[in-house]
Image: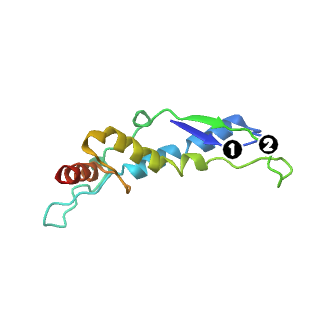
Amino acid sequence: MTANEKATACREPPGYEIRVRGPVGPTITQAFPCLTATRRGQDTMLTGSLADYVMPTASDFPVVRAVALEEKPAPHNPLGAKGAGEGGIIPVGGVIANAVANALRAFAVQPNALPLSPPRVWQLIEEARRA
């Protein structure tokens, strides 16, 4: 996965990479959340503690490459610098939905809402089969 930013006058490259890469992980977990489960017909929680969740680890995430698209300096501040970090937040959900749609192209599945939990993806497959 590549995160591009229109960041100029990058004075601290390691800090830039952290600001760009950092938001990707939490955004992925928002697209694929751990769901709570209840016993059918009851209000009993089956996922009542962190021991019941599959917690994501570093190996669950893609390698993210941070790329600074250094264009002309910003005219509105003395350093000419621009912000960085939004590239890891804003497009990730759409990227994930497109990847799921591509993987399930044979089923004509078109996800149009997040989160994409396993039950939700299965529901999309079943709806496509019935259509």
Residue at 51 percent of width and 44 percent of height: 24
**Where is residue 4, by image quadrant?**
top right
For marks 1 and 2, the one nearer the N-term is: 1
Q: Quadrant of the C terminus?
A: bottom left
Q: Is residue 29 left or right of residue 46?
A: right
4 in relation to 114, above or below: above
Residue at 19 percent of width and 51 percent of height: 126
Disc number at residue 6? 1
Residue at 25 percent of width and 55 percent of height: 47
Total numbered circles:
2
The percent coordinates of residue 85 (x first, y second) are 62, 47
39 in relation to 97, above or below: below
The percent coordinates of residue 92 (x first, y second) are 48, 47
Residue, disc 2: 72
Q: Residue furthest front?
A: 131
Query: Which class describes the residues within 10 Å of circle 2: few (<14), some (14-19), or many (20+)?
Result: few
Q: CA distance from mark 1 to mark 2?
A: 9 Å
Disc number at residue 100? none
Query: Which class describes the residues within 10 Å of circle 1: few (<14), some (14-19), or many (20+)?
Result: some
Q: Is residue 1 left or right of residue 120?
A: right
Depth check: give the residue in front, 36 or 86: 86
Q: Secondary structure at mark 1?
A: loop
Q: Amino acid at mark 2?
A: Lys
Depth check: give the residue in front, 55 or 123: 123
Q: Amino acid at mark 1?
A: Lys
The percent coordinates of residue 38 (x first, y second) are 20, 60
The percent coordinates of residue 72 (x first, y second) are 79, 43
Residue at 21 percent of width and 56 percent of height: 46
Residues at discs 1 and 2 in contact (Cβ within 8 Å): no
Q: Is residue 106 left or right of residue 22?
A: left
131 in relation to 2, above or below: below
Q: Secondary structure at mark 2?
A: loop
